Structure formats: structure tokens, C-alpha cells
Amino acid sequence: MNASAPLAGQRVLDLTAWQAGPLSTMILGDFGAEVIKIEAPQRLDGWRGGAGLTADKMYERNPIWNAVNRSKLGISLDLASDEGRRLFLGLVADADVVVENFTPRVMDKLGLGYDVLRAANPRIIVAALSGFGQTGPWRDYSAFAFPTEEVSGLAYLTGARGGPPTLIGASVTDAMVAAMGAFAVVAAIERRARCGEGDYIDLSQIETLTTFIAGELVQATRTGVDPERVGNDRPGSCPHGLYRCLPDGDRIAIAVRDDDEWHRLCEVIGRTDLAADRRLASVAGRVVDRDRVDAAVGAWTANVDATDAVDRLQAARIPAALAARSSQLAMDEQLWAREFYRIIDRDEVGAHPYPGPVVRLAATPAVIERPAPLYGQHTDEVLRDLLGLDDDEIAALHAAGVTSNEPLAQDWR
Amino acid sequence: MGGSLALDGVTVLELTTGLPGAYCGRLLAMLGADVVKVESPHRPDEARAAATGADRFLHAQKRSVVVDLATANGERLVERLASNVDVVLDDGALGEAPDVRVRYDALLAADPRLILVAFSPYGLDGPRAGWQSTELTELAAGGWLPHGPHGGPPVMPGAPSARCGAGTFAALGALLAIAARRTSGAGQLVEVCLNEAFVHLLTAPTVFFTYTGLDMPRMGDGYPFGIYPCADGSLGVSVLTQGHWQGLCRLMGRPDLIDDPRYRTGVERANPEVAAELDRIVAAWAAEQSAHSTFHAAQAMRVAVTIVASPTEVLSSPQYAARGYWVDVDDDELGMLRLPSTPFQLASGAFATFRPAPRVGADTDAVLATIVEASA
């Protein structure tokens, strides 16, 4: 462990599964916390796969599971058993943080509510990252990325002009919740360093996401009507959109923020006649004549290689970028030049590049070396070193199915 | 230091005009930091300029000073302010990447305890340092717009969620630097590269490609994840697990589908032909349902069928209200407003008391007087 890391000395017990919770604890691990991920032998993290995927250890091969569980130790422990629960409380006694993303009923059902954890460790910080929060009429409703996008107001606002509500198309709301979860935990750690008190973080995923639409909420309050969907239009910018280029119809984004940029764009696309057109001199005029503007830009991009088009626009200081597919992102020149991707070698899957630090601290950078744990990889080590169990006791736990070196269920989704 | 808030006594100078900096500043203010927003006539604040009212949320609990950054006096003043605070947030007020690095180094050398959070579109170095960006191009470069819904043109998220996500990473970075300073005594540069933050918020596509050699397909256009028109609006339908699938069949009154070998597991249902067939079944069912009653009936069965809430529905939702999510503000210009309070709750209640967003320059005299005093 890196002693100067921001979270050095913080031990985090991670009960989370899928993406929002695991990504939040991964960030804590990247910055020096000792994160111990706990999975039950009978019920694995859902990302590890579904029915029919136990063959050939498929549960070790999910790219997303491996991506969001690096920088952690992994142990197998059945919290629903009396012995597992007792051992877990033993770990809590000497831990700093517990993070879970169950629906609210689960921790109480396990007999591991906040009161119980606090009794085991008065300074404990517990972070609960549920879909709807620990209280309120919808508390027991379950959620993950897409439902939270739908209920929080985000999906309603996304979509083509005049078209239906639309999903963003990837599980990004999980990552936003993960960022907020990690922020809340580090804030609680900072507060405890000052006043000595632990805390309980009740994060409702929809409430985090709804803070992103404050402007739309204000407008809806004032007018009593909901805003329209506007596709890729944004006030004050025209042209503003995606245009097809060579060689394969790859799209680039172009955003013109003011009249100076419009004039420079006309130069780049060889249409100084448009720059001289008084009807297009202001944003308002270009919006009225949007079809003509888009046709002119599109006629130019259609005959230029995408990367060349972006280079020429950026040389004229006009915001432009390739609408990158995952393959292009994975090989992106700028991201590699800055060593954003980190290659981590892991048993069962070999070496792969993974996204690097979420934020770069110059003096105490993230350390991204430890691969996502194999199932139960650190069970014995943690039971022995942190709880003082001897080999016979550990063997008995294995025999009783309280822990296991491999999943005990065939279909855990 | 005492106090029961995480950032009591921490001062933040917000030089940023973009949304990531504004959101970051607000998060720090919620935890008790004294966030002073520096507004310059030459660099209008994006949230204020947009005039949607988002600034009432983003700039709440901050103070506002006006300093003309384009004058030598203004520059000196900002340097004096910077040397008196714990954290500076910058997204171009001090210069553009890569040249701004020199300025940052000078500020950090002048005050070794300073934490400088630097936002940039592509990072402070590399071949694209200094490239221009807007939210649209940031989304494109970050991999958010490779394909559009149903094979059509890509569409931006309607809310600036990615920029707020980047702002959250930034606030986290500031906290981590504060934690590190506790032991080291030293501040540092905290670099927030929007391109990298956006890629991180996606995570799945890049690793999906490196593992499989395939571009990750778009999700959310139909079974197993989609939004379907219903009798009085829209319903979101999500099937992530075998339990969700079986529950959906029961909710639709089609338990017969559960035992149909063609649909048995996610493996069979992932076949595009089968998925299209299921999409038609779900669409036909959804068309007859009403949104809110179906949402509650589904959730009672632990099925992930949800409303697609509009802003007015969010505002009138019993869930947010029951949790005390809202702050009602009587705004001089805009009238009664309902704003989100905090993105999470704490048993300790350790958040700073809400204060409405300041008018531009409301605290100029008070802040400048403190600085003059401090350096006297």
C-alpha cells in the first residue's frame, strides 16, 4: 500500500454488485483505500453472468466486472448465515467504511442495519446507494441504470425534436451515481477526521440524477409545462450537430458558438459566400435557415476524411470532434498519449487496457495495478490476517458453505 | 480544526464559467466550504447566461465577486485571492492548455498548500491539449454519440448529465487532495480532463471492445431495455435478470412465455429475431397500460417497469417530497422556485445551511475587504 495515498489506511467493506456500487469502491481503491469486496458463494455479483455461464469459469471473464472491480481484494462470505454474519461484524469492528447498494430491506433482513453496524464500530461510515433512498413510499422499489434514468427525469428530456423520450444508450447513470457515492464517502471520511464521528449516507440514485436537471425543474415550476425535447439543438449555437464524413460515413460533431466562429467555419469549408450572407450573420438568422446551413456543412464534410475535417476545424479554433465508436476510443491517440489507459494483467483473461484514474492528482496519483480479484481469491488471507482464524477454522467454514473457492450456485441472476 | 461539517473553514475560489466547475463548486459548498465565485465581464458564466434558472441551483450557497480578469489589476487581485484560499477551480480564466501550466506552477509555488483543480477539454498535455470543445463535441469525443436510437442519427442526452458527472469527479478530486494534505501538508494540481471523465462515465464500451474486438451496440432501443408508448405516456421496461423476465411475463398476463423454450434464458432472448418478437409483444401490451398504475403494480412484483417522469412529474412525485428533497426559494426575479437540496442525505445532517444563489457581484466589497485585511 502507498502510504502517501489520499485514502491510505482506510478499510472499505464492499457489499455492492453490478456497476454503480462497484465503480464507487473501485475509485476509493484507486486512491489508496483497502477495499474488500464480499460476495456470497450462493449469489454472485450479477455482472459475472447469468444462466449457463458457469462453464469454463465464464464468471471470471466479464469485461465490465473486471473493469469496475480492480484495486480490490475479493472474499467469499455468506452473510445470510449466522457464522458469516458474525465474521462480517468482526470485519466491521476494524473497518472504516461499509458500502452497499441493496434495496433497503436487505441489510435489515440480514440483521446488518446501521444500528447493528454502529454497535460493532461507533466510528463506522455506512454508505447505502439504493435506487430510491432508504425512506419514502418507493423505498422498496428496485432500480438500476435504465430505470433511474427514466424515473429521475433524464430520459424524458432526451430525444429528437417531436420524437419520443429516449434512453442515452449506455449504463452511464450508474457511473454518475458511483462518482457521487465516492464523493459522499470521502466527505464523510474528511468529516470524521475532524470530529471523530461516523455517518450514514443515504444516497437515492434518482435524487442524485435529478440534481442535473435543476434548470428544467425551475422552468417547469414557472410555466407549469414540461420542456420540449430538442435533439441536438442548443440555444445560441448554429450550426450545431453531427455530420457524416469519409471514409465510412463516420460522424463528426461541430459546434459554432458565435459569429466569429461562423465566419471561420465558412473559410474552412470554402463557402465565404455564406459568411457574406446577411441573413446568416446572426445565430437567430442561421437557426431560421438551419437546413441551408446544415446542407452546406454536410456537403463539405461528406468529401473529407473525418480526422482531417476535425483537424482543420480545430486549427481554426472551432469546436469539433469525431463521434468515436468504442473501437476508436480504445485506440484514441490523445488518451494513449496521456497514458489514460492502464494495462492490467489478470488470470483467466490476460492483459487488457482499462480506463485509468477518474481524476489526476499530481502529487498523490491513483495507483492502478491490482486486477479485479478472482472469485474468493483473498478469502483465506483476510480470514487469517484480519480475523485471526487458523487453518482448521477456515477449512470448517469452507466445508459448511459459509465461504467457498468457487461459486456454489449454477444460476445466480 | 473543529466543526461538524466536512469542509468547515475551507475556502474555494471558483474561477470557472463552465458547468463542471459550477457543479463541483456547489458540491463543495454543500459540505460547508466558503465558495467565492469570481465573475468577469469578459468571461460570462454559462449557467447564468443560459437563463434557464439552473444557476439558482448551481450557485446557491456561494458568494459572488466581480473582477475584471482582462485588466492587470484584475489579474493581481485574482492572484492575491488565490494565495488566500485552500482550493482554486479554473477552466480557462488563467489561460488555455497547454500554456496555462506555467501559470498553475507559479501559483502552486507561491502557495505550497494550494489545491488547484484544473478543468480542460482534453487535458493539459498531449497532441490535443488546447483543442476547443462544447458539450456536444465532448460527448462525441468521449464516445457517447456513436449511434442513434433505432439506427437513426445520434442524439445528445437532454440533460447535461456528463458534465455534472465530470464536476462530481472534480469535487471528489478536491476532497482527495484535502485528505492528502492532512498528512503531507502539501497541496497539488488536480487535473480534470473532460474527455477522460466522459470515457470513464461510459466504462463499458472500451472494455467491451478490448475483450471482444467488437464495437459495443447501443442499448435502450427495445427489448430487453426500452421505452414504449403507453395509453397515457411512456413506460420504461428493463429486463436485466431472469427474475425480471419472469416477473414481466406475469405482469403482462403471459406466464405461458416463461416456459417457452424459445425465450427460456437471456442467451436465447439475445437472438435478434427473438428480441424483435419480444419487442412486439411488449409494445402491444404497453400500448394498453397506464403509466403510473403499471409502475406501482410492476414494482410490487419487483419488475423493473417504470414511469418516464417529466420534470413536472418529478416535482409532484410523492417519493422526492416524502424525503424532503426540495428547497423552496422565493426568488426576486423568478418567483417561487423548487430546487433540489442535496444529492444524498446524511444521518448527521452535516450539510451547510441553504443560502440562495447570490446576484452577480453581491459579495464583491465584503470579499475584497477580507483579502485586503488578510494581506495587510
Image (spheres, rainbow, N blue to C red):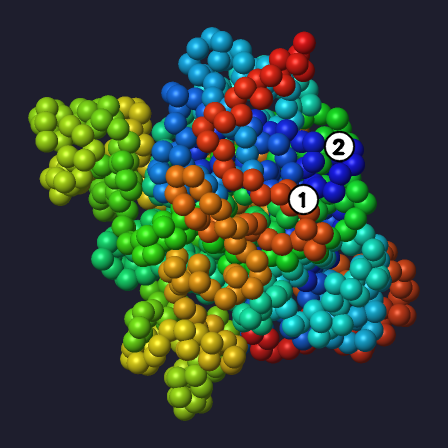
Nearest the eye: B92 or B331: B331
Q: Which chain does the residue under circle 2 lie in?
A: B
Q: Position of residue B217 (x, y in %)?
A: 37, 59
| Quadrant of the image occupied by residue B218 | bottom left
| Quadrant of the image occupied by residue A283 | top left
Amino acid tagged 1: Ala
Disc nearest the viewer among 1 and 2: 1
Residue A214, can we see it? yes
Residue at mark 2:
B182
Residue A187 bears which disc, if any?
A: 1
Q: Is residue B46 left or right of residue B113?
A: left
Q: Is residue B283 left or right of residue B248?
A: left
For the N terminus of chain B, the image quarter is: top right
Q: Which chain does the residue under circle 1 lie in?
A: A
Task: Classify 10 Å Cα crowding around label 1: few (below 14), some (14-19), many (20 and above).
Answer: many
Q: Position of residue B36 (x, y in %)?
A: 56, 28
Inter-mark Cα distance, 1 to 2: 14 Å
Q: Are marks 1 and 2 on the same chain?
A: no
